[in-house]
Image (cartoon, grey):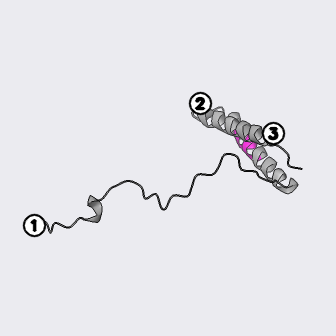
Amino acid sequence: MASSGRERHRDRDSGHRHLDDPPAPAGDRVFRMTADERQQIAKALRFIDGARLALQAQHNAENREIIRELRASADRIFDVLSDLEEIP
């Protein structure tokens, strides 16, 4: 089969299209959080902790990594929230 000489779509640069990527968020953004939002986050953290405890109670060695990641994730979220500065 002869080639027409035209560049095909699949022959073009296979890199990601940068126009579709959203810009990276700035690291110094300020957020406000309501008491209700804090309660929602606390509820989610309790849910994560409950799931971790339920998996631990199964005493299944295959769950060790999941349990470790659930604990670490909840701890990271809690640390981030604890370190937030209050805005007057």
Q: How far across and down, in percent of the image, does residue 70 sit?
A: 67, 39
**Residue at the spot 71% in from the left edge and 35% down from the top edge:** 57
**Mark sitting earlier along the chain (2/3):** 2
Looking at the rendered structure, the secondary structure element under dot 2 is helix
The range drawn in magenta is 47-53
Front-most of residues 83 and 75: 83
- Which amino acid type corresponds to the residue marked 1 in the rendered image? Ala
- Which amino acid type corresponds to the residue marked 3 in the rendered image? Ser
Looking at the rendered structure, the secondary structure element under dot 1 is loop
Q: How far across and down, in percent of the image, does residue 56 sit?
A: 69, 34
Q: Distance between the residues labelled 2 and 1?
A: 60 Å
**Mark sitting earlier along the chain (2/1):** 1
- Which amino acid type corresponds to the residue marked 2 in the rendered image? Ala
Q: Nearer the viewer, mark 2 or mark 3?
A: 3
| Residue 25 inside the magenta-drawn segment | no
Mark 3 = which residue? Answer: 82
Q: How far across and down, in percent of the image, does residue 49 sit?
A: 75, 40
Above or below, 3 relative to 69: below
Left or right of 33 on screen, residue 10: left
Q: How far across and down, in percent of the image, does residue 71 sit?
A: 70, 35
Q: What is the crowding at mark 1: few (fewer than 14 residues within 10 Å), some, or many (at least 20)?
A: few
Residue that protrudes farthest toward the left in the picture: 2
Mark 1 = which residue? Answer: 2
